[in-house]
Image: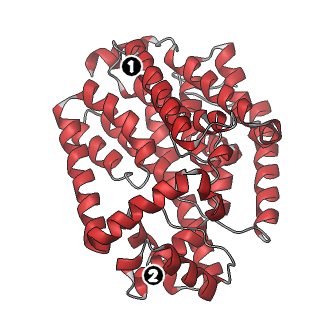
Amino acid sequence: MRSPENREGELALSSEAVLLLGIVAGFCWFALLVFSHTATLDFSALYAAGGLIVEGHRRQLFDLATQAEFQRRVLGMPAPLPFLHLAYEALIFAPLALLPFRLALWVWRLMCLAMLVGSCRSLGEVFYARRRDIALLALALFPVALAIVQGQDSVLLLLLFSGALVAVERRKDGLGGALLGCALFKPQLVLPLAVILVLKRGARFAWGLLAACVACVLLSLAITGMRGWHEMVDLMRYAGSAAGEEIGATSWARPNLRGLLDLLGMNAKTTVELAVALSAILLLAVAWRLRNCSDARSLFPPMIALTLIVSLNVNLHDFTLLLIPVMAMLETGTRRAYLCVGACFCMPVLMFMGHLVFFVLLVAVLVVTVTAPLTEERQQRAVNT
């Protein structure tokens, strides 16, 4: 994967890798853009959330009947695709809701591409890689293409995670905590990493995280009020239950531990309890393995892989965050790391092989990143941090 021309330890892709990634990227984007013309896009839920705020229905933001009526009236959707994130995120989409749906979708896609460029720039600083190579890796990663074509918010999540990684690497722990706290619209993907970083980075990170989280919660409450908050909680519970399939919340389709357990046919309560117990065991095991690590480049990649494994609610577009572990694995230069990276770029094929394959892939990424040997430079940076 490395080019022999790279200098001063800079990670650079070989010409063969560039060609293969270009082919993969072309296939992913062409297939998804063709498919998107007939599919129901996830952007519909985000657009509807912004539209309800524009129309003055912010108090009913999480009322399923209100969401369904807007999507049927404005978007012509027969079945609702609910907005299930904290209300503050809907403010991002309120200006877009002033535009026609298709125009708003393309504006958001362009914004996502801009955020992806920002993420690549941040990761280039951390992993000493060429930005154009990171950009090619990102464009060839199927979840990234899926998130942008579907109009999802996973690239925004990647931008915040990447920014937090850079901030912590620069010892700006308060800023790193604040950036991670701003990603609270998907708390299930933030909290596991946040817990470890609070333990490892201390008070400054914790205060930054707490300030951002409190601000996000208070802003959400100001938008919907307490009644809207309770409706959000109820809607999230309903989406996570066995009955949530009618609104597109099929827990058995989640490509991680929760989805794998759901395939066993147990009731929803037992599945959740077992998932929580196994997740706690995995979290303790990984935390013990990382007990001597404090630098961000050693903590972020395995914790992202672990978070995707144990999250009670994760979708394939959330695998966009795997770009960070991919960069960490390429940095190690080991054969098993390259094999794992190669598997990450085979996700379009893995989709047809069942959820067990995705679970195995995430476990492989976790094992490779949690046991990755530190280079001399990384060891020195860890000591300085």
111 relative to 285 in the view: left or right: right
Residue 318 placement (x, y as % from top left):
57, 47
Give amino acid for label 2. Answer: Leu
Which secondary structure lies at badge 2? helix
Looking at the image, is 8 positioned above or below residue 99?
Answer: above
At horizontal 65% and vertical 30% (from top left) the residue drawn is 359
Residue 214 placement (x, y as % from top left):
22, 54
Q: Nearer the viewer, residue 298 or 227?
A: 227
Locate residue 10: give its quadrant. Answer: top right
Residue 277: image tag: none
At horizontal 62% and vertical 29% (from top left) the residue drawn is 362
341 relative to 117 in the view: left or right: right
Q: CA distance from mark 1 to mark 2?
A: 42 Å
Q: Is residue 2 visible?
A: no
290 relative to 212 in the view: left or right: right
What is the crowding at mark 2: few (fewer than 14 residues within 10 Å), some, or many (at least 20)?
Answer: many
Say which residue label 1 marks.
Answer: 287
Locate residue 230: give its quadrant. Answer: bottom left
Identify the image quadrant of the C terminus.
top left
Say which residue label 2 marks.
Answer: 52
Q: Nearer the viewer, residue 238 or 192?
A: 238
Marks 1 & 2, CB-CB < 8 Å contact: no
Locate residue 340: give its quadrant. Answer: top right
Which secondary structure lies at badge 1? helix
What is the crowding at mark 1: few (fewer than 14 residues within 10 Å), some, or many (at least 20)?
Answer: some
Total marks in image: 2
Residue 165 placement (x, y as % from top left):
39, 37
Q: Is residue 214 visible?
A: yes
Identify the image quadrant of the N terminus.
top right
